[in-house]
């Protein structure tokens, strides 16, 4: 029995009967999609309508001997069909791209095939014994191609599609996580992990984050560290991949096998009130059918006019074509359907040429949340988004209440500029042109003393919310530096911090705490 036989079942070219009524069969059918034909029976019968029998376990009850019928596939083997790689064996394989991405992908690629050439327009010689060639030196039609560059992936796949090649059949993107993830391994983990308490989170069913290089995640990567797809993947289900569905299975069976139980507040104890253990409000059937991506965070362009110390140590400007391609792709195929769009978590929204491309279109059903540092928010920038969304929420990260502190913590920013941006936002709020105006403050030892004045500033500007969160270590601080910078020991505020949290200004109704427990101060 070859792996190709399994793919025939998956592609609907063959019919399978599952022996036994295991819930795993339901999960498999769900993950493989509606097209799959998988019947259920108690035993292997002489049924000419069945090409394969999938057996969970050989028991005395089902009287099966594996060797008795070559149509029998063991479930543990069949699960390999979830690996989203089907490299045809009728053609040699060529890799396209000889840069650093190839280093990352070559280990996985070698597990599936032995590439014959690497197409690269500038490299000479060979890599791990595989010769470099120019694209003009070979007939691309003779090869199955794995695109091993992220930077030029969009360009190369457009070229291949224009030349009549089909993604999946004639080429795949090596950076497509469906290829790099071992889906079979993920599925085994999802179905064998112990169930936990039920949590209220439904993110894998409704939410996508579009990150750097077009990589997609169902939560922030630190909390749920699995890439589920890539925007630049041309397949029809780029936003509903097998990997996405496997993650959803881990929610259906309440194992949450891939979520970070320490970092995620839903999983750790910081949001116990959201545990739904005794409330029957999460229904598996509902889960199965309600999986529309309605909530999208866009954060693929790191370009920023600031270099804040908690984020980066130098200015980053990225005007690559890849970012423009990602913007065009999601504007066409993802964003028109979403209800909530947030731009942009990892750079300055009004500096990015790619994000400007997103705002070329109108999204009448979408509420836009802008995350900005406010330094270049002017009437011209407002015109880029005005009237193009159902509603607009403005959120500015400020982190200080004085010029001196601001220019220290928001490196590269100018207090006068951010105040000009905030005044404009305040005016737009008063005129009813934005539905919410929020200012944010990441608390550290550099600025915590200014928290009460920041609340006063928010009040004066007419903000709906003044949000405080504690600084996180994204790898820019050593452990000892972070201990000094943070005003918390674990979840517990340090003594000086407790004093600030207990001041009357901090009880203003516009104050909101994101990951700070301020209740007992
Ligand atoms: S890590 Fe937490 S917030 Fe993210 S998907 Fe899992 S439960 Fe939800």
Image (cartoon, rainbow, N blue to C red):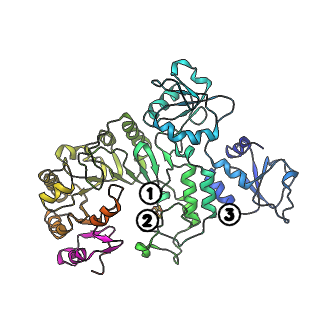
Q: Is residue 509 magenta?
A: yes
Q: Are marks 1 and 2 in contact (CB under 8 Å)?
A: yes
Q: Are marks 2 and 3 in contact (CB under 8 Å)?
A: no
Camera-nearest label, 2 or 3: 2
Question: Which one is earlier in the sequence, the residue at label 2 or at label 3?
Answer: 3
Q: Pointer 1: what residue?
A: 219
Quarter of the image with the N terminus in it: top right
Which secondary structure lies at badge 2?
A: loop
Q: Residue at x 12, y 57 (%)?
A: 403
Q: Pointer 3: what residue?
A: 23
Percent of width and height locating residue 357: 32, 39
Residue extending farthest to the bottom is: 520
Q: Pointer 2: what residue?
A: 264
Q: Is residue 105 left or right of residue 390?
A: right
Residue extending farthest to the front is: 480
Q: Is residue 119 left or right of residue 221?
A: right
What segment is highlighted magenta in the picture?
486-515
The Cα–Cα distance between marks 1 and 2, rounded to whole angstroms, is 10 Å
Picture layout, residue 384 above or below residue 265? above
Image mark for residue 277: none
Q: Can residue 164 be seen at all in this image of the molecule?
A: no
Which secondary structure lies at badge 3?
A: helix
* Quadrant in which residue 380 is drawn: top left
């Amino acid at each position: 029995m070859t792996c190709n036989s399994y793919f025939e079942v998956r592609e609907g070219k063959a019919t399978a009967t599952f022996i036994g009524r295991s819930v795993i069969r339901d999960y498999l059918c769900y993950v493989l999609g509606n097209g799959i034909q998988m019947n259920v029976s108690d035993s292997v019968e002489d049924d000419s309508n069945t090409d394969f029998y999938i057996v969970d376990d050989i028991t005395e009850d089902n009287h099966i001997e594996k060797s008795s019928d070559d149509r029998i596939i063991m479930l543990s083997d069949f699960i390999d069909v979830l690996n989203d790689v089907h490299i045809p064996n009728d053609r040699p394989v060529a890799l396209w791209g000889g840069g650093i991405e190839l280093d990352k992908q070559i280990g996985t690629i070698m597990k599936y095939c032995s590439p014959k050439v690497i197409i690269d327009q500038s490299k000479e010689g060979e890599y791990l014994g595989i010769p470099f060639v120019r694209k003009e030196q070979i007939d691309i039609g003779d090869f199955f191609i794995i695109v091993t560059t992220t930077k030029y992936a969009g360009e190369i796949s457009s070229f291949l599609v224009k030349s009549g090649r089909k993604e999946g059949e004639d080429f795949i993107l090596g950076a497509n996580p469906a290829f790099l993830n071992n889906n079979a391994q993920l599925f085994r983990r999802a179905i064998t992990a112990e169930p936990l308490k039920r949590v209220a989170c439904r993110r894998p069913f409704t939410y996508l984050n579009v990150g750097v290089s077009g990589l997609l995640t169902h939560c922030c990567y630190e909390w749920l560290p699995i890439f589920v797809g890539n925007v630049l993947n041309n397949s029809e289900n780029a936003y509903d991949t097998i990997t996405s569905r496997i993650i959803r299975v881990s929610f259906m069976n309440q194992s949450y096998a891939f979520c970070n139980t320490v970092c995620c507040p839903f999983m750790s104890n910081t949001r116990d009130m959201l545990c739904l253990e005794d409330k029957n409000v999460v229904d598996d059937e509902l889960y199965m059918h309600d999986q529309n991506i309605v909530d999208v965070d866009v954060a693929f362009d790191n370009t920023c006019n600031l270099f804040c110390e908690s984020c980066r140590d130098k200015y980053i400007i990225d005007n690559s074509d890849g970012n423009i391609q990602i913007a065009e792709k999601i504007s066409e195929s993802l964003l028109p359907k979403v209800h909530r769009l947030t731009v942009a978590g990892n750079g300055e929204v009004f500096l990015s040429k790619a994000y400007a491309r997103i705002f070329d279109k109108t999204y009448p059903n979408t509420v836009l949340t802008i995350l900005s540092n406010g330094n270049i928010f002017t009437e011209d920038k407002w015109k880029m988004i005005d009237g193009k969304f159902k509603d607009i929420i403005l959120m500015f990260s400020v982190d200080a209440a004085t010029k001196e502190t601001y220019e220290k913590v928001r490196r590269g920013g100018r207090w006068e500029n951010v105040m000009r941006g905030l005044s404009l936002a305040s005016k737009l709020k008063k005129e009813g042109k934005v539905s919410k105006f929020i200012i944010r403050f990441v608390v550290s030892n550099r600025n915590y003393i200014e928290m009460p004045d920041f609340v006063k500033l928010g009040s004066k500007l007419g903000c709906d919310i003044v949000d405080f969160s504690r600084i996180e270590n994204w790898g820019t601080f050593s452990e000892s530096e972070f201990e000094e910078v943070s005003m918390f020991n674990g979840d517990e505020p340090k003594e000086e911090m407790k004093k600030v949290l207990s001041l009357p200004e901090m009880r203003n109704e516009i104050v909101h705490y994101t990951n700070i427990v301020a209740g007992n101060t």
